Amino acid sequence: MEIFRLNRMSSALLALCFGIYHIQCSERKGTPIDTDYVAPPAADTISSIKFKDMLGINGFEWEFLNENNEIDAEKTALIKPFGGFRHYLDWNRIETEENVYAYQPSLNGNWGYDDIYQWCKTNGIPVLVCLKTIPDWLRATYPEGEDDYENAPLPYGQDKADPASYRQFAKLGFQFAARYGHNAQVDTGLVSVSPDPAWSPNQRKIGLGLVTYIECNNEPDRTWKGENAHQTAEEYAANLSAFYDGHLGQLGPGVGVKNADPEMQVVMGGLTKGDVDYLSKMIEWCRVNRGLKEDGTVNLCFDVINYHHYSFSNEDLFAKGTRGRAPERSSAAEAAIKVVSLAKEEANGTPVWITELGYDVNKKSPLRTLKIKDKSPLITHADWSLRSSLLYARHGIKRLHFYMLNDVDIRSSIQFSSSGFVQGSERKPAADYFLQANELMGEYAYLHTLNSDPIVDVYALDDKRMYVLMVPDEQGREVDHELEMPEAEKVKIYTLQVGQDKMAVRIEDVVAGKLKIHVTETPVFVEPIGVPGL
């Protein structure tokens, strides 16, 4: 849920703001939660979800660069724990005047986007570029008082339901994909770049192969910025159709991402929530206005379905006592199941991502985490964030991006202001947990879930197995658990550590085919060793 981003950050940021072993349970401590566990979907919808894909982050260009706009080793070290980077890129950064494009450096901020995306590729961090907001020259077409940066990306007075109204934004998609995509055969006559600045002129480059994913705006269904900013499902589908392929090429040459790089993946702008009615209407618009493919499926104008989900205790963000909820106690799983089911049934099995989720640590925020027994809100933030990653892998979401790398202001009680994973030059516990989990099992893929309370997930990498156990609660409940492991001789048990790069590890014997293990609300990882064939 995204509500009133006006207070997120100084202007730019404010605009956003299987298993071979049987598991048994014994000697539970504390009071079990109400049985609201939601079973995961069938395995065919969740195979091949690598855990590192569930560890993405949101952020901005300045989180890579120093005061000289060069890659900063200290800053980028804080990005390395994550499995992906969603880059909030304002349109105005790279097209400061109509049809004037600049990237290295940009003419607004002198940012070096080639350097940023090259660093990400070199370090194995896939980038999702979220092109958002409108530039000054387009904003100027709106009357005073209506000229908001988050207006839909079309000139004032044009029809939001007509793909042609979004031609300029679709041209931007073409230019960006031509430069950063993987197609080196783009017609150079269609690619434009500014010769400025004189001291370091931009160079025309094609097919750099640095970006695979591009997102068409952010939260197009927003309601809090008025009608100029809000798009209905049909209006946003028209916008996407232009951006995707120039509305089937009807908008002319040099328009649409796919006309520059057919392999670049166009990600739907993250909806404010998993609204299946909105999504279904978009799909129907595509059926009517884009037709069917040769195989009889709808010719969609997106490669990824994308929505946002923040786990609150109350649908009314501003109701007294509203706070963040543990992921398993929230509506997160229910929403994911609905959207993944819709994608399978109506959208040709299109992958589903969530590109904003998270919690605040400020004790007065309506999205706050809790102090639970001896755990501070910072530790709970780490627990709930990692458990969110595990939950969404369990329910068929293909990729996550958490909000966000840095705090807006950790002292602020305003929602989304203290959601960061780093503070200054230091990792918060949540970033420690992500770094350690990525290091241990980033390449492992979710296999299935064996038990619901405590949750026991199984991940696989070739013949290797990793068991992840956690209590799905928010009251400090603990469980003594027994795993039947008749073929294992020993196990490695990994526990998360605050302030460290790696988990603590100990080796324990499997006695009479069983392992006794203590499980808490912090995930614990168990790796069988001494298993024949492994």
Image (cartoon, rainbow, N blue to C red):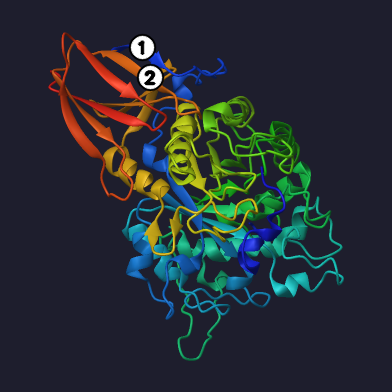
Question: Which one is in front, 67 or 113?
Answer: 67
Q: Is residue 127 left or right of residue 159?
A: left
Q: Residue at x 62, y 51 (%)?
A: 244
Q: Position of residue 206 (x, y in %)?
A: 45, 67
Residue underneath mark 1: 27
Q: Residues within 10 Å of mark 1 (few under 14, many from 20)?
A: few
Residue type marked 2: Val
Q: Position of residue 30 (x, y in %)?
A: 45, 19
Vertical arrangement, residue 157 with respect to residue 326, above or below: below
Q: Are marks 1 and 2 in contact (CB under 8 Å)?
A: yes
SS state under label 2: strand
Residue 253 seen by the camera: no
Q: Quadrant of residue 469?
A: top left
Vertical arrangement, residue 222 with respect to residue 274, above or below: below
Q: Is residue 44 left or right of residue 532?
A: right
Question: Which one is in front, 296 or 388?
Answer: 388
Q: Position of residue 498 (x, y in %)?
A: 33, 46
> In the orientation shown, which residue stands out farthest toward the front?
374
Which quarter of the rendering shows the C terminus? top left
Which quarter of the rendering shows the N terminus? top right
- Looking at marks 1 and 2 on the same chain, the residue that comes earlier in the sequence is marked by 1
Residue underneath mark 2: 479
How far apart are the two marked residues, 1 and 2, measured between alpha carbons? 7 Å
Q: Is residue 103 left or right of residue 505?
A: right
Q: Position of residue 75 (x, y in %)?
A: 38, 66
Q: Quadrant of residue 440?
A: top left
Vertical arrangement, residue 88 with respect to residue 346, above or below: below
Residue 297 seen by the camera: yes
Question: Which one is in front, 394 or 180?
Answer: 394
Q: Residue at x 76, y 60 (%)?
A: 151
Q: Residue at x 40, y 70 (%)?
A: 115
